[in-house]
Image (cartoon, rainbow, N blue to C red):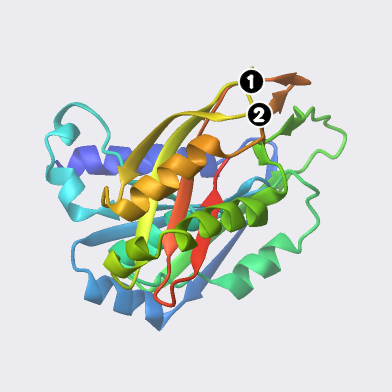
């Protein structure tokens, strides 16, 4: 098993070795990382990826190496999109606050690299060092072509959607009384390119309570939604809507693209 794990680690490091790119490494020692691994002995490693499109975190558990999935395939870590509040909520609920070397990340990103950078970091349970590798193209004459896309949008933006759902909940005060101090719901939805309303709304995480039913019914009536554009044409969209009722009974709403 150790040989297969070593091969897997080499496979994961291959994207860091990029031909024709400038590579800058740095090591960041952080005692807070050590506390995370002490608090969670099952935690094996943490992998960070910072790209022009955002931040992503992968969490590897020691248990994944012993799972039946590992017998035939490379194991799948827990993946979190740090640009999406729903994923950040799940990450904190599962592992608590994971410290990231923000100053070192900012220092590396300040290097001249235009839009085409890639920063990867990894911390393991046998060290308190966060290794960061920053890649950017060294050939400034190389041309890049970016596909212009527009993500899913709601008329009035996320504040308007939050207000719509909040009003629906306030009109059902009995629902609020039944809820615990902090509740979170995740809905998987589909937006057709031909319509401006949501289809196939499915509760994927959270209790199917009166609160959840009120939110689902209001999501069915919500709109108009604007489908994403790809090469100027509307396309179908599948995304997650995150709704959280905070301890102070305020509502927080986010959705990813």
In terms of secondary structure, where does tag 2 sit?
loop
| Vertical order, 156 against 149 (above or below) | below
| Vertical order, 8 against 174 (above or below) | above
With 9 as the anchor, is 240 left or right in this view?
A: right
Q: Quadrant of the C terminus?
A: top right
With 87 as the anchor, is 41 left or right in this view?
A: left
- Residue that appears at 67% across and 39% down: 153
Please state which of residues 126 and 248 is positioned toward the viewer in this rendering.
Answer: 248
Image x and y of residue 172, in percent: 41, 59
Image x and y of residue 240, in percent: 47, 41
| Vertical order, 81 against 14 (above or below) | below
| Residue 183 quadrant | bottom left
| Residue 180 quadrant | bottom left
Kindly identify which residue carries mark 1.
Answer: 235
Please state which of residues 96 and 175 is positioned toward the viewer in this rendering.
Answer: 175
Which residue in the rendered view is the most extreme toward the right? 141
Mark 2 to mark 1: distance in Å? 6 Å
Asked if the residue at tag 1 contacts the one at tag 2, i.e. Cβ–Cβ closer than 8 Å, the answer is yes
Q: Quadrant of the N terminus?
A: top left
Q: Which mark is residue 227?
A: 2
| Vertical order, 65 against 127 (above or below) | above
- Residue that appears at 18% across and 35% down: 70
In terms of secondary structure, where does tag 1 sit?
loop
- Residue that appears at 25% across and 61% down: 43
Please state which of residues 181 and 37 is positioned toward the viewer in this rendering.
Answer: 181
Crowd class of label 1 (few under 14; some 14 to 19; many from 20; radius 10 Å): some
Crowd class of label 2 (few under 14; some 14 to 19; many from 20; radius 10 Å): many
Image x and y of residue 67, in percent: 13, 40
Image x and y of residue 121, in percent: 49, 57
Q: Could one spot residue 167 in this view of the protein? A: yes
Q: Could one spot residue 59 in this view of the protein? A: no
């Amino acid at each position: 098993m150790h040989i297969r794990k070593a091969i897997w680690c080499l496979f994961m490091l291959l994207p860091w070795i990029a031909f024709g790119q400038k590579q800058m490494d740095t090591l960041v020692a952080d005692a807070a990382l050590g506390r995370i691994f002490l608090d969670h002995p099952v935690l094996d490693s943490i992998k960070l990826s910072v790209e022009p499109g955002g931040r992503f975190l992968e969490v590897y558990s020691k248990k994944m190496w012993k799972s039946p999935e590992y017998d035939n395939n490379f194991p799948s870590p827990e993946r979190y999109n740090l640009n999406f509040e729903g994923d950040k909520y799940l990450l904190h609920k599962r592992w608590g606050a994971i410290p990231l070397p923000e100053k070192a990340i900012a220092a590396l990103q300040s290097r001249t690299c235009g839009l085409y950078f890639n920063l990867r970091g990894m911390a393991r349970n046998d060290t308190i060092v966060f290794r960061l590798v920053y890649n950017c193209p060294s050939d400034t004459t190389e041309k890049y072509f970016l596909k212009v896309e527009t993500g899913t949008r709601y008329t009035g933006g996320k504040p308007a959607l939050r207000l719509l759902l909040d009003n629906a909940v306030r009109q059902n005060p009995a629902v609020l009384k039944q809820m615990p101090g902090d509740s979170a719901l995740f809905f998987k939805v589909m937006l057709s390119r031909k319509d401006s309303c949501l289809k196939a709304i499915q509760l994927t995480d959270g209790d199917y309570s009166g609160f959840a039913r009120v939110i689902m019914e209001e999501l069915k009536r919500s709109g108009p939604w604007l489908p994403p554009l790809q090469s100027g044409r509307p396309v179908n969209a599948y995304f997650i809507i995150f709704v959280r009722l905070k301890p102070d009974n305020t509502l927080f709403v986010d959705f990813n693209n």
